[in-house]
Image (spheres, rainbow, N blue to C red):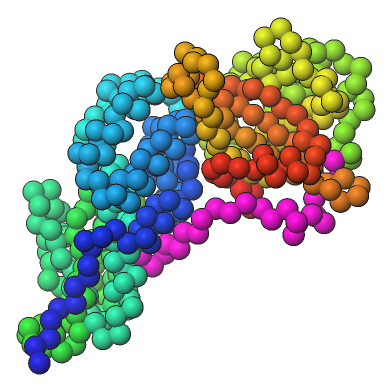
């Protein structure tokens, strides 16, 4: 009986590939080296993207592209209008929100090609690794170089090398082994190797992966979807809301209250605050007033002003909420909708009912700024606010 080399069917996008990319946690970075090796497996990031709404746009569009089998050109055509609207296209000066450093960067088709290729390539290679590991007899793997114009010499030299799948080489060198590496691996049985006259290589093999890629994208990755905190299970451990109330704040005027908020964040009015997702937020008194209407004393929220700052600084969960606008507004990138970021911190009453503090910010064309901050004093309302896309959960 003729023994065929094991082949895997990639005509349809397996759900595990879609889920892998979908479950990666959105992470803002200015430089690519801020995330090292395996950290990239669980984080979705694009260097020099410094706003979470834009990173979410790119992430969501890539998920849709993989799900529907959309190639690079089709994806590029769909995402460029969004990038143009949000000022992330062409030659741009982008500021590092943490350091103030400004770099001139070029965002063009080549940059998008790298974003598309790296993310889709890793997702497919992870799936292929998992499928090959399930094959009971095909335990020998052959390294395959793509022999493209930009293929590295070290990768070419490895072409055709056969190693057992448990060989230590694969710990750091299961492809991709560098940016835009298109090398692959095929699985073979022992009888298939004999028929082909191939002999597995023994002993130590020199690593060919660059430092950033010296890990196994298949073996090290098990990305679970970010799930909301189970407040029912953790209720006993939640702090009591009344105990974080500060009665000494009730006699302060508006300026005194907002200064307490700024002091708790260790910033001045108008400064940039970097949240848990590395998102820069411009801190003003918009959290506590709407136009000329002062809302800081609504329902006693002034007594929680310091704890509201803590909710922004150290939230239990962060959500992105996407809202359609009843009236068009040129404040936003899309005149018909806006993106709101919700910071949630959880508490309970003495009787054991759920409560929360919530801080809201919105993404404008040129900055991210506050909308409101208040107490959620209804158990039902706590859960209704925990909707849309969860992007952060406290460990």
x and y percent of residue 360 in the render? 64, 29
Viewer-proximal residue, 64 or 112? 64
Q: Quadrant of the N terminus?
A: bottom left
x and y percent of residue 199 in the render? 13, 84
| Most common secondary structure along the magenta stretch | loop
x and y percent of residue 297 in the render? 83, 20
Quadrant of the rendered image containing residue 273: top right
Residue 291 visible in the snapshot: yes
Residue 72 appears left or right of 145? right
Residue 227 appears left or right of 375? left
Q: Which residues are magenta?
A: 215-241
Q: Vertical placement of 48 versus 331: above or below?
A: below
Q: Residue at x 87, y 33 (%)?
A: 245
Q: Residue at x 68, y 24 (%)?
A: 372
Residue at the top extreme of this rendering: 292
Viewer-proximal residue, 199 or 382? 382
Residue 216 visible in the snapshot: no
x and y percent of residue 143 in the render? 18, 69
Query: Is residue 224 one of those drawn in magenta?
Result: yes
Residue 125 appears left or right of 298? left
Residue at the bottom extreme of this rendering: 1
Residue 383 appears left or right of 202? right
């Amino acid at each position: 009986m003729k023994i065929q080399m094991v082949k895997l069917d990639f005509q349809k996008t397996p759900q595990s590939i879609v889920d892998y990319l979908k479950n990666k946690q959105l992470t803002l970075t200015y430089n690519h080296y801020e995330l090292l090796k395996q950290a990239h497996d669980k984080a979705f990031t694009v260097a020099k993207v410094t706003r979470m709404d834009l990173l979410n746009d790119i992430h969501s569009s890539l998920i849709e592209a993989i799900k529907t089998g959309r190639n690079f050109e089709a994806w590029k055509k769909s995402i460029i209008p969004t990038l143009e609207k949000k000022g992330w296209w062409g030659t741009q000066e982008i500021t590092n929100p943490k350091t103030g450093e400004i770099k001139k960067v070029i965002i063009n088709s080549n940059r998008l090609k790298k974003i598309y290729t790296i993310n889709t390539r890793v997702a497919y290679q992870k799936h292929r690794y998992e499928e090959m590991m399930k094959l009971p007899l095909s335990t020998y793997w052959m390294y395959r170089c793509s022999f493209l114009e930009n293929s590295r010499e070290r990768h070419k030299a490895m072409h055709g090398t056969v190693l057992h799948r448990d060989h230590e080489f694969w710990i750091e060198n299961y492809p991709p082994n560098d940016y835009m590496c298109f090398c692959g691996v095929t699985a073979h049985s022992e009888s298939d190797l004999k028929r082909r006259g191939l002999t597995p290589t023994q002993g130590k093999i020199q690593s060919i992966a660059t430092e950033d890629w010296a890990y196994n994208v298949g073996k090290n990755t098990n990305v679970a979807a970010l799930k909301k905190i189970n407040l029912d299970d953790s209720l006993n451990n939640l702090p009591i809301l009344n105990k974080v109330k500060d009665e000494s704040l009730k006699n302060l005027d508006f300026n005194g209250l907002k200064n307490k908020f700024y002091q708790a964040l260790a910033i001045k009015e108008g400064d940039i605050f970097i949240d848990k997702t590395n998102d820069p937020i411009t801190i003003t008194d918009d959290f506590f007033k709407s136009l000329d209407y002062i809302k800081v004393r609504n329902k006693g929220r002034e007594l929680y002003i310091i704890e509201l700052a803590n909710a922004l600084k150290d939230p239990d969960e962060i959500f992105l909420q996407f809202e359609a606008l009843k009236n068009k507004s040129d404040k936003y990138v899309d005149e018909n909708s806006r993106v709101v970021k919700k910071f949630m911190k959880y508490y309970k009453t003495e009787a054991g009912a759920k409560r929360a503090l919530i801080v809201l910010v919105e993404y404008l064309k040129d900055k991210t700024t506050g909308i409101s901050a208040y107490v959620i004093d209804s158990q039902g309302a706590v859960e209704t606010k925990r909707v849309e896309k969860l992007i952060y959960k406290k460990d």
